[in-house]
Image: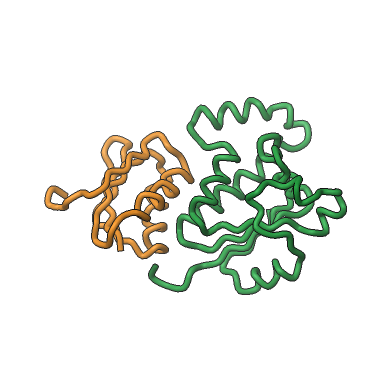
Chain colours: A orange, B green
């Protein structure tokens, strides 16, 4: 994770479905291909929701992790 | 986008808070997932498209007494209100809103009574034309 350059930070902690996904779409809309967004969220639904969103929108999850209830995703924009 | 956009077609028949939430949650999420979302508001659902309709939606039947409490809980856990969800739907650029013309006639609702987010006033054939090749079809 240390070697990946983060272009955009998106903090969705404390938000529930559908907010993190809607915010994620909004944030990635203005990003360029190959840029990386780091999403942090606490909604347990995001564990499956974020990969589902990525598979439908063609974006790539580089890494995902969990640390004491906070889920972190690194997403490369296509 | 990796493939042809997916399509969602939803008949919104209910006008109560508990049913309108799933409609707008699925629609805002679908829009954010690059799906084309088509919402066809009919019968009690049409009330949601009237000016002030989303704000005044209540829980069904006797549970309507608990609407305020439910809205407080929704606010407390940071879940958006129905008007906020509608705004999110529209901000994706992928969610289309249709009002059923027959319901408008039955309930004497005029075009100017509806919120400006309504894209069109249509009939069953328009919905079916959209729904027949949609990937998700729901009746809520």
User: Which residue appears at 49% of the width and 31% of the height?
Assistant: B77
Extreme-left residue of the structure = A3
Q: Residue B52 at what x, y percent from top left?
A: 70, 37
* Quadrant assignment, res B9: bottom right
User: Which residue appears at 49% of the width and 54% of the height?
Assistant: B92
Extreme-front residue of the structure = B112
The answer to which of B13 and B114 lies nearer the viewer is B114
Q: Residue B58 at what x, y percent from top left?
A: 71, 35
User: Which residue appears at 86% of the width and 49% of the height?
Assistant: B108
* Quadrant assignment, res B17: top right
User: Which residue appears at 66% of the width and 53% of the height?
Assistant: B118
Image quarter in which the C terminus of chain A is found: bottom left
Left or right: residue B29 versus residue A69 is: right
Left or right: residue B61 versus residue A73 is: right
Q: Residue A51 at what x, y percent from top left?
A: 37, 56
Q: Is residue A19 above or below residue B9?
A: above
The answer to which of A23 and A17 lies nearer the viewer is A23
């Amino acid at each position: 994770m240390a070697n990946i350059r983060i272009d955009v930070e998106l903090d969705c902690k404390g938000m529930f479905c559908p907010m993190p996904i809607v915010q994620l779409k909004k944030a990635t809309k203005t990003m360029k291909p190959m840029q990386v967004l780091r999403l942090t969220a606490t909604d347990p639904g995001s564990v499956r929701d974020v990969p589902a969103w990525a598979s439908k929108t063609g974006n790539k999850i580089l890494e995902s992790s969990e640390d004491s209830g906070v889920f972190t995703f690194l997403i490369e924009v296509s | 986008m990796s493939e042809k956009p997916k399509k969602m077609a939803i008949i919104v028949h209910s006008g109560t808070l508990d049913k309108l939430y799933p409609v707008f949650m699925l629609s805002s999420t679908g829009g954010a997932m690059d799906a084309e979302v088509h919402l066809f508001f009919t019968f009690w659902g049409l009330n949601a498209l009237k000016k002030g309709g989303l704000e005044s939606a209540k829980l069904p039947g006797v549970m309507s007494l608990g609407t305020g409490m439910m809205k407080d809980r929704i606010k407390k856990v940071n879940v958006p209100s129905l008007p906020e969800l509608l705004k999110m739907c529209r901000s994706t650029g992928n969610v289309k809103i249709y009002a059923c013309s027959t319901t408008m006639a039955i309930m004497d609702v005029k075009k100017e009574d509806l919120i400006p987010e309504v894209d069109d006033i249509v009939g069953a054939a328009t919905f079916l034309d959209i729904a027949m090749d949609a990937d998700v079809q729901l009746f809520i």
